[in-house]
Image (cartoon, rainbow, N blue to C red):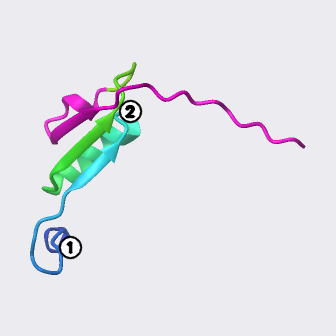
Amino acid sequence: MDYQNTLRGNRGENRSAIVLGGQVNGLGVIRSLGRLGVPVGLIAIVMDGDHAHHSRYVRYVKHASEPVSYTPLTLPT
Protein backbone atom coordinates (compact mmCIF):
# COMPACT_ATOMS: atom_id res chain seq x y z
CA MET A 1 0.00 0.00 0.00
CA ASP A 2 1.29 3.44 -0.90
CA TYR A 3 0.86 5.40 2.35
CA GLN A 4 2.15 8.65 0.90
CA ASN A 5 -0.77 8.83 -1.54
CA THR A 6 -3.34 7.93 1.11
CA LEU A 7 -2.17 10.88 3.21
CA ARG A 8 -3.27 13.31 0.53
CA GLY A 9 -6.79 14.68 0.42
CA ASN A 10 -9.19 14.54 -2.49
CA ARG A 11 -7.70 17.70 -3.99
CA GLY A 12 -4.09 16.64 -3.47
CA GLU A 13 -3.43 18.77 -0.37
CA ASN A 14 -1.27 17.42 2.41
CA ARG A 15 -2.94 16.33 5.61
CA SER A 16 -1.73 17.00 9.13
CA ALA A 17 -2.56 15.63 12.56
CA ILE A 18 -3.03 16.94 16.08
CA VAL A 19 -2.21 14.54 18.89
CA LEU A 20 -3.81 15.04 22.29
CA GLY A 21 -1.52 14.01 25.13
CA GLY A 22 2.22 13.55 25.15
CA GLN A 23 2.67 10.46 27.24
CA VAL A 24 3.99 7.16 25.84
CA ASN A 25 0.95 6.45 23.63
CA GLY A 26 0.95 9.94 22.18
CA LEU A 27 4.67 9.70 21.52
CA GLY A 28 4.15 6.47 19.59
CA VAL A 29 1.47 8.06 17.43
CA ILE A 30 3.66 11.11 16.79
CA ARG A 31 6.60 8.96 15.74
CA SER A 32 4.50 6.78 13.45
CA LEU A 33 2.86 9.71 11.70
CA GLY A 34 6.09 11.68 11.53
CA ARG A 35 7.94 8.84 9.83
CA LEU A 36 5.23 8.86 7.16
CA GLY A 37 5.82 12.56 6.59
CA VAL A 38 2.66 13.81 8.28
CA PRO A 39 3.08 17.20 9.99
CA VAL A 40 2.13 16.67 13.66
CA GLY A 41 0.95 19.15 16.27
CA LEU A 42 0.73 18.34 19.97
CA ILE A 43 -1.65 19.56 22.64
CA ALA A 44 -0.48 18.36 26.03
CA ILE A 45 -0.20 19.06 29.72
CA VAL A 46 3.37 19.01 30.96
CA MET A 47 3.58 16.28 33.57
CA ASP A 48 5.91 13.47 34.57
CA GLY A 49 6.55 11.09 31.70
CA ASP A 50 5.52 13.62 29.05
CA HIS A 51 8.39 13.59 26.57
CA ALA A 52 6.53 13.89 23.27
CA HIS A 53 7.04 17.63 23.03
CA HIS A 54 10.76 16.94 22.53
CA SER A 55 10.15 14.74 19.49
CA ARG A 56 11.72 15.87 16.23
CA TYR A 57 8.43 15.14 14.45
CA VAL A 58 6.38 17.66 16.44
CA ARG A 59 6.03 20.94 14.56
CA TYR A 60 3.68 22.73 16.96
CA VAL A 61 3.19 22.40 20.72
CA LYS A 62 0.35 23.92 22.71
CA HIS A 63 0.41 23.37 26.45
CA ALA A 64 -2.95 23.18 28.15
CA SER A 65 -3.38 25.82 30.84
CA GLU A 66 -4.58 23.57 33.64
CA PRO A 67 -3.97 19.93 34.42
CA VAL A 68 -6.93 17.64 34.10
CA SER A 69 -7.74 15.57 37.14
CA TYR A 70 -8.67 12.00 36.44
CA THR A 71 -11.05 10.47 38.93
CA PRO A 72 -11.74 6.77 38.65
CA LEU A 73 -15.32 5.78 38.05
CA THR A 74 -16.63 2.98 40.22
CA LEU A 75 -19.79 1.26 39.11
CA PRO A 76 -22.03 -0.37 41.71
CA THR A 77 -22.28 -4.12 41.42
What is the three-letter code of the residue carrying label 1? Thr
The secondary structure that most of the magenta stretch takes on is loop
Residue at point 38%, 34% (across, down): 24
Is 38 placed above or below 67 here? below
Q: Can you name the residue that lies furthest to the bottom here?
A: 10
Residue extent of the magenta highlight: 51-77
Sequence-wise, the earlier of marks 2 and 1 is 1
Residue 61: name its quadrant. Answer: top left
Percent across and percent down for residue 74 are: 77, 37
* Pointer 1 residue: 6
SS under mark 1:
helix
Is 59 within the magenta?
A: yes
Residue for badge 2: 23
User: What residue is rendered at 32% in x and 43% in y?
Assistant: 28
Compared across the picture, whether 60 is left or right of 49 comes to left
Mark sitting on residue 60: none
- Using the rendered view, name the quadrant where residue 27 is placed: top left
Horizontal side, residue 56 vs residue 17: left or right = left
Residue 75 among those drawn in magenta: yes
